[in-house]
Image: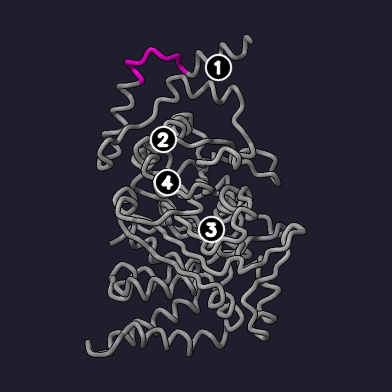
Amino acid sequence: MYEFHPYYTADGSVGLYSPEFNDIYHSATGALTEAIEKFIEPFDFDLLVRKSEIKILDICFGIGYNSKSFLQKIFSLTEHNIDTIYTNKINRILSTCNDKIYNDNIFNKISVTAVDNDKILAFLSPFIKTGEKNIKNNKFDFEYKNLEKYLKYDKKNPKPKIEKIINFLIFEKIAQNLPEIFSNSDIEQILSNKEYHRYFDTNLRGIYELYKNAANKLTPVVNKLSFLHNIYYNHVSKCYKRGLKRYQLQDINFNLKIGDAREVIKNDNNLYNLIFLDAFTPSKCPILWSYEFFKLLYQHLEDDGMILTYSSSASVRNAMVEAGFFIGENFNLSKNKSLGTIASKNPHLIKYKLSEFDLGLLKTTAGIFYRDENLNAQNEVLIERRKLEVKNSNLMSSSQYNKKAKLL
């Protein structure tokens, strides 16, 4: 059976443990908070003004916090004008954000392409709860660096939450495009396991059962997707009419791609406005941090597009630079600190540049990047290849560089 290891993080959202990497997917202090702070708050949404279509690429989708947080932000920018738009049939969205007016069909068409090689995890993504209050973690079924000490849940602090309609939207798109979700035995076992019920939305589990039972009764002659679509609107829109209006108006498309991100992107012809790169740390999953992978991303990013990632690794930043990007700090103004790296083809979009110290670090052995010439190597191969290159390098080590910098 599939290994599923959920737990509640300190902000009331669900975190996961990966047995493959012996690591946690999310910050134990707040899984959803981490996504918002690193991928949403640092991004300037003014850059999306007057785009006829917004295209997002979410690499390592997991349970979807980055995509969900982005859609949540988009919905919050348009929420106050939905009723007016429908009443007057106006093809324009007026919304105020940071004292600026967004208009001229802003955010009308949004396409999110989510990529992950873990099909089960991606299928479970829309069911995951957020914003839970009075959470109580049972004993973990895994061991990870005294995880309990990070889970300092404060009832007084506001808990970020993803609107249910966003999870319904993602579920509907998965159901339409990947109906195998209803015949997958691992999904069935996990969703029906009472041990996991506290992590899943009860209403959405009910909709899943409704879909699944209806699909099983249909004959091959009947258009299953059309039938399921009707079930969805007959049973869900009564409870979520306002939310459904919002994403119907904005023409949101969510496309889940299962497989190796390198292969998926090679076979993708889209240019993206925004790329979330949220793979496991380079030291454990270097295949998605190599120079060649960044060259691939360069080919799939619009001229005024941006890549956001949590990584501040010198090897990652150097790979980005060598691939042709201009890079800077992924700076969160509300936290007043850097939470990663931003890359773009356009130097004018880099608001917070790297310090002289960080730029110098790229020229040390720490800046030696992973190489994956054919974009098909295994993680272990890239790790050993880089180790050998570092060993044989004449570059200054990062420790020597630090000592030298302190003397200056």
Give the alpha-carbon distance from disc 3 to disc 4, as whole Å: 21 Å
Q: Residues within 10 Å of mark 3 (few under 14, many from 20)?
A: many
Identify the image quadrant of residue 370: top left
What's the amino acid at mark 1?
Answer: Asn
Residue 279, disc? 4
Sequence-first disc among 1 and 2 = 2
* Residue under label 3: 8
Identify the image quadrant of residue 403: top right
* Residue under label 1: 402
Sequence-first disc among 2 and 3 = 3
Which one is closest to the eye, mark 1 or mark 2? 2
Q: Residues within 10 Å of mark 1 (few under 14, many from 20)?
A: few
For the point 65% across and 44% down, which residue is it? 332
Q: Nearer the viewer, residue 202 or 52?
A: 52
What's the amino acid at mark 3?
Answer: Tyr
Q: Residues within 10 Å of mark 2 (few under 14, many from 20)?
A: some
Identify the magenta region: 390-397
